[in-house]
Amino acid sequence: MKTKTLKKNKVNVVTLGCSKNIVDSEILMAQLKGNNFDVEHESQSEDSEIVIINTCGFIDNAKQESIDTILHFSEAKSAGLVDKVYVTGCLSQRYKDDLEKEIKGVDAFFGTRELPHLLKTLKADYKHELIGERLLTTPTHYAYFKIAEGCDRPCSFCAIPIMRGKHVSTPIEELIVQAKSLAAKGVKELMLIAQDLTYYGLDIYKERALAKLVDQISDVEGIEWVKLHYAFPNGFPMDVLDVMNTKENVCKYLDIPLQHGSTKILKAMRRGITREKTEKLIEDIRERVPGIAVRTTLIAGYPGETEEDFQEMYEFVERSRFERLGIFTYSHEENTHAFNAVDDVPEEVKKERADLIMELQSGISYELNQDKVGKTYKVLFDKVEGDFYVGRTEFDSPDVDNEVLVRKDEFHLRLGDFAMVEITQADHYDLYGKVID
């Protein structure tokens, strides 16, 4: 018995996990709209007939959030607040059989590459003319831009290849069409993403083609910033740095997850690189592109990580002085190579080590930010929070990096616009400034 009037053909898409999932949801939403569905992203109105949950299955916390969300909407269905609940994405790809047995309130589960099947279940057509089209869930001035799917890397801790399959590059000509379409809608910043950017092109062009792709995307009219996310260190294509130097709209920013600073642990992780080679790579990158901001992510508590291994990673971070850094605690994932090892670092030790790294990084970030005081930067403004406009420099990406705050009562700014800002004050992660006319 229904307790609420639901709008027929209204779909609420809920996205969990990474930016790659965001792109998948945006593509799904464009297809639904093309089939005359009324579609919203993470709607607060609670009047949708259909809910589609795009799940994450990467690490324990993400999996739990996905399961909790599925259970929430299953209960909403039981209460008559929703008619249909569908689940897609990485968790569904990885654990479909288990989920079907354990959770009865879901109408159907779909994998990461089953969009046509999902649409067919909704009695919708997969419209080929809409390939590449998206309904943006981000502010309209920036978009995540997925250039490949899947991954061929053998990293011992990672279940991504299980959930996303082998690496498949999207051809350059298709990506340029997509970039032009986004630019026509007002997108000014493209953040290039993939499981591994640096592998781009090897499957279809038989060579690393990231530099060629970035060069051509930077020529798309209206695109003022291009950023590179998720570059693998082993086999890094140094020619992309030449494009970064020659094209003004290719940001001096590189997200390069390094995972650890101990050669022993890197070997166990099957990363194909040593700490010494990693340090040389970072040194070479900074030498080739002076002023570049390097973002990395690390893992604390990998099986067999001793105090000595952790200390080696700590000193690696201390020496490297990364502009941006995040760290995860190791998650013991079944069907990965590392699952055969004993998860022997206690959870409290993992967390303690991660906290020590972030405390170190906080100090490094504070010192680097002090150097910005008195300097002027081009800033893209994303949102308003309290008394401030909030924006970013070319050295920062949304949600994960530093922000620039400008007082609302002192300047008038439009969201999605650029402005030159002089930095007047800095703390550990935020910069404060004034607009320069």
Image (cartoon, rainbow, N blue to C red):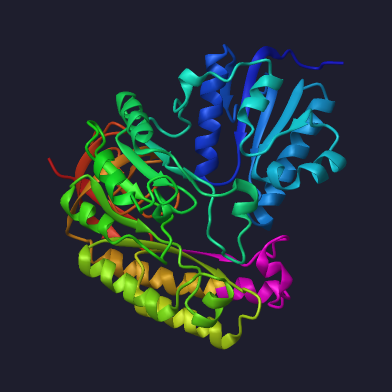
Q: Looking at the picture, how far across and down is residue 258, in whole percent?
A: 46, 67
Q: Nearer the viewer, residue 68 or 169?
A: 169
The residue under the point 71% across, 74% down is 341
- Furthest residue toward bottom: 308
Relative to 120, is 345 above or below?
below
* Region in magenta: 325-353
* Above or below, comparing residue 118 to residue 302 in the picture: above
Residue 239 position in % (x across, y down): 26, 58
The residue drawn where x is 66% and y is 64% is 331
358 left or right, relative to 61: left
Q: Most extreme residue toward the front, as rendered?
A: 206
Residue 49 shows in the view: no
Q: Residue at x 32, y 60 (%)?
A: 237
115 to the left or right of 375:
right
Quadrant assignment, res 139:
top left
Decide: is 173 above or below 59. Answer: above
Q: Quadrant of the N terminus?
A: top right
Q: Is residue 361 magenta?
A: no
At x 50% / y 36%, what residue is drawn? Answer: 23
Figure quadrant of the C terminus: top left
| Residue 71 seen in the figure | yes
Left/right of residue 69 with respect to residue 224 in the rendered view: right
Where residue 30 appears, as percent x and y from the top left, is: 51, 22
Q: Quadrant of residue 295?
A: bottom left
Q: Name which quarter of the figure residue 270 lies in.
A: bottom right
